[in-house]
Image: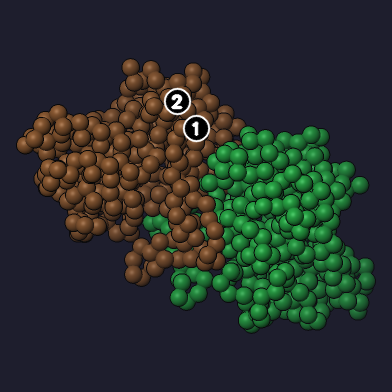
Chain colours: A brown, B green
Amino acid sequence: MEHSSHRQRGPHRHVTEALHFDGDVLRAIDQTLLPWQETELELRCAGDVVDAIKRLAIRGAPLIGVAAGYGLALELARDPLALERASDRLRAARPTAVNLAHAVDRVRSAAIDAGPGRAAGAALAAAQSIHAEEEAASAEIARHGADLLTAARRVLTHCNAGALAAPGRGTALAVIAELSDRGHLDAVLVTESRPLLQGARLTVYELARLGIVHELIVDGAAAGLIASGAVDAVVVGCDRVAANGDVANKVGTYGLALAAGAAGIPFVVAGPTSTIDPCCATAAQMVIEQRGPDEVRRLPAVSAAAGARELTLSGTRCRNPAFDVTPAALVTALVTERGVARPSLDGSVMALLR
Amino acid sequence: MEHSSHRQRGPHRHVTEALHFDGDVLRAIDQTLLPWQETELELRCAGDVVDAIKRLAIRGAPLIGVAAGYGLALELARDPLALERASDRLRAARPTAVNLAHAVDRVRSAAIDAGPGRAAGAALAAAQSIHAEEEAASAEIARHGADLLTAARRVLTHCNAGALAAPGRGTALAVIAELSDRGHLDAVLVTESRPLLQGARLTVYELARLGIVHELIVDGAAAGLIASGAVDAVVVGCDRVAANGDVANKVGTYGLALAAGAAGIPFVVAGPTSTIDPCCATAAQMVIEQRGPDEVRRLPAVSAAAGARELTLSGTRCRNPAFDVTPAALVTALVTERGVARPSLDGSVMALLR
């Protein structure tokens, strides 16, 4: 990291705040160290934000969009000539989530439209607008999703689609929290979400803070538990949604959709409309990020006392796709801030964007 | 353990030998320490064998049957009056695999039929027969399976169904090794098989020794890779097969069967007929073992240098079914030493037992 630094967080708050902008610094909780250490990164330029996104200290499609917007604004405040270079670096930090490109393009356009001397201020205002809109979207997603799932008392979720993935209370976890607020929820089954354990580390952390009853399972246990009748609905987030309703999300999502379909329970995807990519007709046009083998071969060090832990023979070849694709036909509902689409019925989500 | 002890193994042999009987001791490789340490347990009584089976130092449906047979014979040689108590303890060591009960019942009957004074010798002979039969079954399973899968160049397997799970070269891995011997195989995709990582630890270890090209993936990646066309067939072992062809196997198997079915590739289950339980009409009558939460919450210590590693907040509630059920309708073929049944076509495997 070029200009970032760490400081310890204060005592627990009940709603997790993944990042906030603080004048000339973007403060973000380092998600690679959760749930054991609550450490805040101080990000001061685009390079800091690129680094934090690449190493998944900041993650979740909406959140990396928000962070990238601030990253570009921070960079412009430091160097007015850095616009194109910083935009390119931020856009390329991760390839699958379209929010990243959307946010960078919007902040960049605001800077260009404002012209010299006003670019940095306009960029920051645009970044703050994106942040505020995504936070408002989270609340609307929660409302629409809970309206849809009044009969779902036992919900399964995958990876982390909470406050650590999107402003507000997140996407899928915002729906779950709203169901809990309405007294409709008995328990949440959480998949651990290997390789990086966002379910075990982040979703468990958020649900514990929210006081929502939950149980952790290994990813392989989900399909059998769904088949056994232990789950009323599957609710997940999304990294990119194609125009036909195909969904790219954390690897493992497609298997959950198959299991939900076989069991006849709803498979619900929650996300802001900023995750919809009208330029992708279907998921076949999406780039699925392939990450390095060490995420599979070992667990990363979380502290000096708990160093990296080998899980297999060193040198073992691994394949590590970060996402998979769930075809629209398996998506019962796509819940956005603008309402609910039914990809499995009409194969389109484009009406939401009109 | 009551009478077991450890010694270090010699240099690698290419075919792994999970256990062998050595006069008055059953020597078994401690599978909890693989692939990092090749340590041999010396088991001298039924209690030692029960302990090794419970803590998964010895695992795999056929192998725990063989080990239990020897365990009963060892106990009878020490105490002729221990027959019923030792039989009960061995039978109860794990609930799902039926091989355990089958083997114990057979060795017990041999002892009773032989009468006082000859019981221990008859028990040992019966245990050795079971061992030899399972070893022969492995070779026949390999032959039938490879005959069936001549078009499968890229195979995915789950958990470990190799020489560490069954005598000889195992079940599913015996088929895979035979495909490799025949020059029909390009590569094997291996799921890591959380929580205990039998794929990452044991199957990778065996395939490396056999010189078969393989890639490791997280469990959640399997369905998406199958859908993407990266796999020609899924081949797994089985812990218990019902009379109608329903299969209980390592948790995560059902999800692989769903993905294979959706992709139109064969889902093949390999196992000796000793895993078929004619007393279970369907899987609904099977007991699915529920194991403790710590297997999900943490990785066990593998050495003093690599202590147990927490994966989530301590105290997190977990659900940890060891197995799941794949309905017969999703099982393209059940490959046994007596030939191949087609559960998805005729819903029965009973013809194999006649």
- Label 1 to label 2: alpha-carbon separation: 8 Å
Say the numbered circle drawn on residue A284: 1
Question: Residue B247 occupies which quadrant of the picture?
Answer: top right
Question: Front-most of A297 and B343?
Answer: A297
Q: Is residue B255 visible?
A: no
Q: Is residue B329 above or below residue B322?
A: above
Q: Residue at x 57, y 39 (%)?
A: B228
Q: Are marks 1 and 2 in contact (CB under 8 Å)?
A: yes
Q: Answer with left or right where residue B339 lies relative to residue A51.
A: right
Q: Chain of mark 2?
A: A
Q: Residue at x 93, y 68 (%)?
A: B113
Question: Which amino acid, mark 1?
Answer: Ala
Q: Is residue A54 visible?
A: yes
Q: Residue at x 28, y 29 (%)?
A: A137
Question: Which amino acid, mark 2?
Answer: Ala
Say which residue label 2 marks.
Answer: A281
Position of residue A66 measured from the top left corner of the image (x, y, whole percent): 25, 39
Position of residue B186 measured from the top left corner of the image (x, y, whole percent): 67, 52
Position of residue B167 measured from the top left corner of the image (x, y, whole percent): 77, 65
Question: Front-most of A193 and B152?
Answer: B152
